[in-house]
Amino acid sequence: MRKVRNLVVLALIGIGGVYLVSIGNAKPVAPGLKVGVLVSDSGSLGFVGQIQRAAVKLAVRDLTDRQVNISIGYFDVGDSDQERARALSRLKSFESDVIIAPVESESTKALVQSTVKSLVPMIAPSSLEDELGEESTKPWLFRLATSPSQDSFALVRFVSKPEPKQVVIVSGSLPQSRAQLRSLSFGLVMNGIRVQTLAIKDVKAVARTKPDALVLLSMEESLPFLSSMASWVESVPRVYLVPSNLADYSGYPFAKALKGVEAIYPRTEVEPQFRADLAQLLGTGSLQGPRASTILGLGQRTYDAVKIAVEARLRAKSDSPESLRSAIARTQIEGKALFERSGFLDQSEYSVFRYSSSGTFSQVSLFSPN
C-alpha cells in the first residue's frame, strides 16, 4: 500500500449524479465493499468534483490486485439544503460500507445527522470543523487532513519559535477568521507573548503598531490589505499568513514588497507517479506551485481514503460497521498509528512557504509542531 500522506484547497468542473463502477479480477468469494463518495460537482465548490473523481479512479485502478469487489457511488452534495437532502437520500439507498466525506463542513454536518446512528465509518480528505464527530463515544469520523485547531496549534508553535515579545493579529470579518483569532490569541498568550488584535479594515492603526511579528488571519479580504501593507511591511520583522491561505500573490505589483512573508500549510506527501497520473486525468499539465498543492493534497487524500477502506475491509473480522470502523482506527503507516483515538490525524508536518525578493512564493522548508 502506497504510503498514506498527511494535510485543505481544488480545480475544474465535474459531472453530477450517481455513477457506479465495479472492479473485476475478484474471485466469487472476494469480500465486497461499497464506498459512497460525496462529491462537489455543482455549486460554489463545483470545481472540486473532477479532482475527487479522478483520485478515486486512480485508487480503484491500483487496487485490482487486492481481491476486494469494490463498488463506488458518487453523490453530488450540491450547494443548497434541498440538493444535500437529495444526495443523502440516494446515499442511503446505496447502503455504503464506507463514506468519503464532503470537502466542507456544512454538508458533512447534514451527513453526520443522517448517519450517526448507523455508525457507518466516514473518512474525511479535507479539513473539517473540530466539533464534527463528537456525537458518538466511538470514533467513526476519520480525518486525513488536519483540523482547524491543529492548524492553529501549529501556527502558534511556528510564530512563537523566534520568541517575539509582541504579536499583532489582524483578523478578517468572516466567522472562520474570528474562530482562528480566539485560538491563536489564547495559544500565544499561553506562550508568554503579548497579543494585540486589530480588524483588517484598520490599516492605519495596524501600520502604527510596529510589532515583532504580525499574523494576517484572512482569506478573501487579504488582497487589499496586503496591497496597502506594501509601503510599511519592512518595519515588521516577521509577517505570517494563516495556514489555510495558500493564495499566490506573486503576480501582483506589491509582491516584491512581501519579501520574507511566510505561510505554513499542512503537508501531503505526493509521489511523482501520482502527480503525473492525476495531471493526465485532469488535463492540467505539471501541477506545480502553491496552488497545485491544494489540488494534489485533496487528490492524494481522496486516493488514500479509498485504499484505507479497502485494506481495512481485508483486515476486518466481519462486514459490520463496527468491525470496519475498528479496522480503520488501527491503520498504521510504517508502524505508527495514523489516527488518534478520537479519529483525528495523529501527526502532521507543515510546508513553509515564503516570498522572495523577486516576489515569488515557494516552499522553502518543513516544520513539525509535534
Image (spheres, helix red, strand yellow):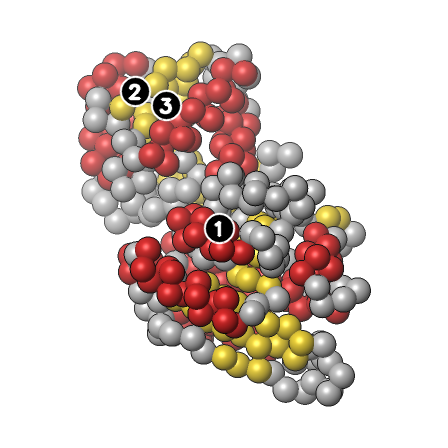
Residue at point 40%, 49% (across, down) = 106
Relative image position of residue 236 (x, y in whole percent): 35, 21
How crowded is the residue under tag 3: few (<14 C-alpha within 10 Å), some, or many (20+)?
many
Going from N to C along the chain, the mark reached first, 1 or 2, is 1
Q: Count all numbered tags in the image, as a single digit.
A: 3
Residue type beneath disc 3? Ile
Residue at point 60%, 64% (across, down) = 98
Residue 353 visible at all: yes
Q: CA distance from mark 1 to mark 2?
A: 37 Å
From the viewer's perspective, tell me whether residue 31 is left or right of residue 120. right
Q: Which residue is mark 1?
A: 113
Residue mark closest to the camera, 1 vs 3: 1
Residue at point 41%, 35% (across, down) = 242
Tag of residue 205:
none
Residue 233 lies in quadrant? top left
Residue 305 lies in quadrant? bottom right
Going from N to C along the chain, the mark reached first, 1 or 3, is 1
Residue type beneath disc 2? Leu
Q: Which residue is mark 2?
A: 198
